[in-house]
Amino acid sequence: MTLRDTIDKDRFYIENVSYSDNDLKTMSVDGLETLKMKIQKKIDGLSLSLKEKQADSFDTNSRKRALYINQRVMVYVSLLIKNHRQQKKSLSDYFFESARDILPIALFDQILDEAQKSVKEGAQ
């Protein structure tokens, strides 16, 4: 899926910032989450505006189109976040399995135990 597939354009603009597919695909999960919040804020504002103003047909149509575009991009950004998280999980799984295969069992268990202790101490 690309922006072209999503909104039939190569760029998405929000808060005077332009995003391309490459920009979105290289963003971190945190960056995508922040963008998702901006899009949700825009969607909420457009929805409220449409509820309040029903008089001007041209203005209403342009707001509906903007709402539709933002909703579509929201789905796309959510998909990118999901894909990023799956990639990271797959990479960590691969690393874990490789370490288990390469390291002697006693050393692997020792490293795993120390990592679990460190995580527990960090959570406290």
Image (tube, helix red, strand yellow):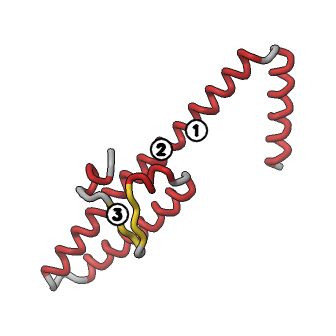
123 or 104: nearer the viewer: 104
Question: Which residue is pictured at 33% across the width and 44% down the height?
Answer: 1
Q: In the image, residue 18 lies at what x, y percent?
A: 39, 67
Front residue of 65 and 45? 65
Mark 1 or mark 3, earlier in chain: 3
Neighbourhood count class around disc 2 (C-alpha, 10 Å): few under 14, some 14–19, many 20 upward? few
Mark earlier in primary sequence (3, 2): 3
Horizontal arrangement in the rendering, residue 91 relative to residue 20 (left or right): right
- Compared with 25, 37 (above or below) is below
The residue at the point 50 percent across, 51 percent down is: 26
Residue at numbered disc 2 = 82
The residue at which mark 1 appears reads as 88
Neighbourhood count class around disc 3 (C-alpha, 10 Å): few under 14, some 14–19, many 20 upward = some
For residue 59, the mark is: none
Give percent across and percent down for residue 105. Answer: 81, 14
Mark 3: amino acid: Phe
* Three-letter amino acid code at the position of disc 1: Lys
Identify residue for label 3.
Answer: 12
Q: Dot 1, how many residues are within 10 Å of its Cα: few (below 14), some (14-19), or many (20+)?
A: few
Element type at mark 2: helix
Left or right position of 123 against 45: right
> Alpha-carbon distance for marks 3 and 2?
20 Å
Depicted 96 relative to depicted 17: above or below: above
Q: Is residue 49 left or right of residue 109?
A: left
Residue 11, given in percent of the width and then of the height, sits at 33, 61
Q: Quadrant of residue 96?
A: top right
Looking at the image, the residue that sits furthest to the left is 57
Residue sitting at x 57%, y 56%: 30
